[in-house]
Amino acid sequence: MKIYCAGKFEDSKRVSAIANICENHGHEITAKWWEAENQLKQHDIPYYDFNGVGNADIVIVLMDNDETIYFGTLMEIGYALRAGKAVFVIGDVGFKRTPLFQHGLINVIQRLKDYELYVAIYEYLKITG
């Protein structure tokens, strides 16, 4: 499965760790922005990220800090939803910020353990075929 992992740049180490879990289970990460953003020009970053979302089957989002504003991450989520992709949000911050998170394609995992992520993805795939 192709997966895009989203989150704040400040959380890039944690997002990278989630991506590594996915890769260790045989999945492909569509864009490793935490490795590429320092090499991209500022105006190229959104295109790189949106291509990663567009090429993914699902999007996994780390959003677990109430003190953080997730402007870019919310744009990636919106782009994924517009494309009909399932979004798995780790954390519950979004419920406090926007009704966007009531969308039927968003799945919230409040506390991440490896098995919770894979059970949620498995259940989604079982339902959607």
Image (cartoon, grey):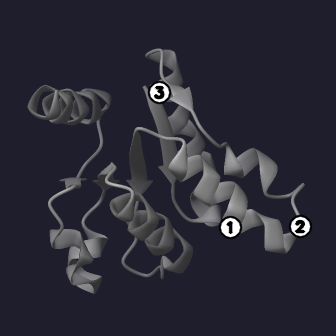
Please rate how many residues cluster around mark 3, counting C-alpha atoms within 10 Å: few if below 14, some from 14 to 19, many from 20.
some
Q: Is residue 119 left or right of residue 88?
A: left
Mark whose residue sits in front, 1 or 3: 1
The residue positioned 31% from the left and 54% from the top of the image is 84
Q: Earlier in the sequence, mark 2 or mark 3?
A: 3
Between 33 and 115, the one nearer to me in the picture: 33
The amino acid at mark 2 is Lys
- Vertical side of 112 occupied by 76: above or below: below
Q: How many marks?
A: 3
Q: Is residue 41 left or right of residue 32?
A: right
**Circle 3 residue:** 21
Q: Is residue 118 left or right of residue 65?
A: left
Q: Are marks 1 and 3 in contact (CB under 8 Å)?
A: no
Q: Report the Cα–Cα distance between label 1 and label 2.
A: 10 Å
Q: Earlier in the sequence, mark 1 or mark 2?
A: 2
Q: Earlier in the sequence, mark 1 or mark 3?
A: 3
Q: Quadrant of residue 41?
A: bottom right
